[in-house]
Image (cartoon, rainbow, N blue to C red):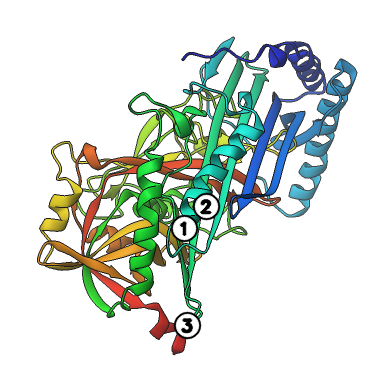
Amino acid sequence: MAHQIDQSFLDLPLRALADAALARARALGADHADFRLERVRNGAVRLRDAKPAGSSDSTDLGYAVRVVHGGTWGFAAGVDLTMDAAAKVASQAVAMAKLSAQVIKAAGSDERVELADEPVHADRTWVSSYEIDPFSVPEEERAGLLADWSAGLLAAQGVSHVDASLLVVHENKFYADTAGTTTTQQRVRLHPSLNAVAVDETSGEFDSMRTLAPPAGRGWEYLTGTEAGTAWDWQRELDEIPELLAEKMRAPSVRAGSYDLVVDPSNLWLTIHESIGHATELDRALGYEAAYAGTSFATFDQLGKLKYGSEIMNVTGDRTAEHGLATIGYDDEGVAGQSWDLVKDGTLVGYQLDRRIARLTGFERSNGCAYADSPGHVPVQRMANVSLRPDPGGLSTEDLIGGVDRGLYLVGDRSWSIDMQRYNFQFTAQRAYEIRGGRLAGQVRDFAYQATTTDFWGSMAAVGGPQTYVLGGAFNCGKAQPGQVAAVSHGCPSALFKGVNILNTTQEAGR
């Protein structure tokens, strides 16, 4: 279903506020100015053992003016939707730029902010791909569906507790700048999750199993849709969880050593996020982003040289993927959404850019990676949908497993740890199955796979076909100071990795 921009948003004085702010910025000598008005509605429902545990429904409405004045950034934000207030916010942004210029000069720096060129996009409108706005569904109905699913899990033998949650977001954004770009956008996304917990009353041991359904740039149809491709197969997964959890509780501890791994997309997306997504943010690789989760081993001097992985590794940055959490029509600098190569045939060939970093490093154009998580925050360089491309003629997951003599099949994300250069890491999973002679031989526990980024991706020996491809992701990618949160998707097929080090986490903890 093709949606229109909400009329209630269009009825706001969008252009009048932008005109007032941009005119004042020009009059005060700004080299560039942009205006961004946002209305972001966030809803959450949480249940514990099929009973309400909390809910929220909030809307953030405001606007921001960002300027480049005298080669320095300035930024200010406001909530008063009057022309005089918008002009005053623009004056505050210019004053901030002048103050910042003094600080920068005192520090001995002569670096000037310049922005890469971008074609003018006048009067453009974009709406994400969804059918039913989740906010059009009463909260009682949303909570009721989670309660029904939770009750079904609780009725199963061996399930002691169930946590359930649903996060929903409806985001409207209007952007205008002094070059003449004006864009109006609307995005919807949601994140449903159920987590079943088993407790052995005799031993006190416990474990959990969470649904694998990823968050998605979809609407309510993701939970209830009847047409093929619109909904996750919730009932199948919920029916399977109790037995899978019971098997996990009985599973033996893994034997540490070297294993071949078949990694399911439900696990591999997070490894992509941490070891490729963050590592190819160019502000991080240059050291401009360092305080929040560090820099990157994939430094700019290695562009076109670094062997990131095996020759079958092809990774794209993408702001256009249907239902992607980081999919947009235009970013928060007025740059059109694009798709581009980050790793090609195993070699680092690209980065994620905003307009300032693009100009600073000699790129002709940004690839649209500027984003602010609220009208009160300045746009920063944020992650696109970073995805591993499948092999067009690749194997199924079952056939990948069939080619492994001794290994593990990993499903679902769980805990992770990675160093400040995005290089040394270890990851666990919701569950791991031992592979013997090409067949699954039951679950094992207490495992983690450990490697360096280049060793891990260098060990990739086979990439599954399109039939194994799933778009995973997260709502809570953090970056910047003050901290900002962005939603991002990562698509990938199942993949085979040779000779990866598997730790027994109970043994490691005891050392």
The residue to which callout 2 is attached is 284
The residue to which callout 1 is attached is 296
- Residue 203's tag is 3
- For the point 79% across and 16% down, the residue is 17
- For the point 39% across and 63% down, the residue is 245
- For the point 65% across and 34% down, the residue is 140
User: In which image quadrant can residue 444 be found?
Assistant: bottom left
Question: Marks 3 and 2: which is nearer the front?
Answer: 3
Secondary structure category for the residue under label 2: helix
Q: Residues within 10 Å of mark 2 (few under 14, many from 20)?
A: many
Circles 1 and 2 in contact, beta carbons < 8 Å: yes
Q: Residue 61 versus residue 353: which sits nearer the camera?
A: 61
Q: Residue 147 versus residue 169: which sits nearer the camera?
A: 147
Q: Residues within 10 Å of mark 1 (few under 14, many from 20)?
A: many
Question: Marks 3 and 1: which is nearer the front?
Answer: 3
Q: Residue 114 versus residue 344: which sits nearer the camera?
A: 344
Question: Which comes before the other along the chain, label 1 or label 2?
Answer: 2
Amino acid type, residue under disc 2 in the picture: Arg
Amino acid type, residue under disc 3 in the picture: Ser
Taking the image as drawn, is residue 99 in sight?
yes
Between marks 3 and 1, how big is the CA–CA gap?
Answer: 44 Å
